[in-house]
Amino acid sequence: MTLLSNCWTAAWKWSGGKEPGVLRNTVEAYSVPPEARDLYEEELQKWIEDGWLLPYDEHKYGPAKGLISLMAVVQRNKKKVRPVMDFRELNATSTRSRRTRRVLRQTAGVAEARGECLRD
């Protein structure tokens, strides 16, 4: 996050040095358990109000080349539900160090051990 723009910027280093083209994902959002729906919707509304989630401007950026799905992460110990963007398809086309992948797998294991889970 930069202090001047107050925005996050993400970048990928593509496998083979070229972007993947059009992503194949067609799922806008995975289903959210009924008991988590209200908290999930509240958090998404906060993202919109805070300017973190914006409509895609096709006129400015051209036709979208992919769809990043949203899913709910239920944090039972904190009594929270977090919307999470599913970058798995995009990340599969990028180069990553083995260490980074290992850390991501360990993080997922920690979340599972804490009773947090990804819902689809």
Image: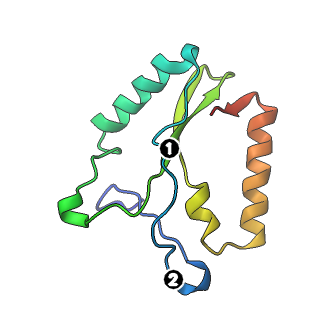
Badge 1 marks a residue whose secondary structure is loop
Tell me if residue 85 comes above or below residue 63 in the rendering.
above
Q: Farthest left residue?
A: 59
Of the 4 image quadrants, the one containing the N terminus is bottom left
- Total number of numbered labels? 2
The numbered disc on residue 94 is none
- Please name the residue shown 53% across and 32% down the image: 82
| 10 or 61, nearer to the observer | 61
Residue picked out by circle 1: 27
On screen, residue 12 versus residue 109, left or right, reads left
- Please name the residue shown 49% across and 62% down the image: 23
Query: Label 1 is placed on what type of residue?
Result: Val
Query: Label 2 is placed on what type of residue?
Result: Lys
- Please name the residue shown 42% across and 24% down the image: 41
- Please name the residue shown 52% across and 71% down the image: 12
Marks 1/2: CA–CA distance: 24 Å
Which of the 4 image quarters holds residue 51? Answer: top left
Label 2, residues with CA under 10 Å away: few <14, some 14-19, many ≥20: few
Estimate the x, y position of residue 103 in percent, counting from the top left. 75, 58
| 117 or 18, nearer to the observer | 18
Badge 2 marks a residue whose secondary structure is loop
Which of the 4 image quarters holds residue 66? Answer: bottom left
Residue picked out by circle 2: 18
Q: Farthest bottom residue?
A: 17
Label 1, residues with CA under 10 Å away: few <14, some 14-19, many ≥20: few
Which numbered disc flags the more N-terminal residue, 1 or 2?
2
Estimate the x, y position of residue 92 in percent, counting from the top left. 64, 65
Estimate the x, y position of residue 39 in percent, counting from the top left. 48, 20
Of the 4 image quadrants, the one containing the C terminus is top right
On screen, residue 25 versus residue 100, left or right, reads left
Which of the 4 image quarters holds residue 89? Answer: bottom right
Q: Farthest top residue?
A: 35
